[in-house]
Image (cartoon, helix red, strand yellow):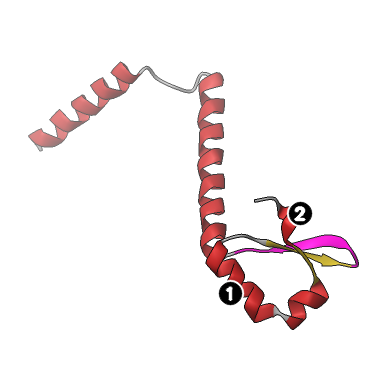
Amino acid sequence: MKLSTAVKPISHIKSHASEIISEISETGNPVVVTVNGEARAIIQDIKEYEKDRESTAMLKLLAMGRKDMLEGRHKPIHLVFAELKKKVRTAEKL
């Protein structure tokens, strides 16, 4: 959905708040709030907001992993598994 189709002036938001919130909850589509014709805020369903935050966190983790790999901070998988097997064997002996 394009945000440009869901632009509402603050005066409309003030006078129709409960119906706008109901619509946002039902559709999951955000609404852009304008003040004096300028976009100033977005009203978004909480579930969609949480999904966006989770997606952003995952993208940050992927970017960090890629950076580590490019900077040489990684091990081949066979070495990682060998180290894990060794730790498991050590723990089993205890």
What residue do we see at 60% from left, 70% from top? 23
Residue located beneath label 2 in the image: 4
Identified by mark 1, the residue type is Ser
- The quarter holding residue 43 reads bottom right
Let me know if residue 38 is in the magenta part.
yes
- Eyeballing the image, is 19 above or below 26? below
Residue 9 shows which numbered tag?
none
- Quadrant position of residue 90: top left
Specify the label residue 22 is tagged with.
1
Categorize mark 2 by other alpha carbons within 10 Å: few (<14), some (14-19), many (20+): few
Mark 2 → mark 1, Cα distance in angstroms: 20 Å
What segment is highlighted magenta in the picture?
Answer: 36-44
The residue lying at 65 percent from left, 61 percent from top is 30
**Which residue is at the far left?**
93
Say whether disc 2 or disc 1 marks the residue closer to the N-terminus. Answer: 2
- With respect to residue 13, does 33 lie above or below? above
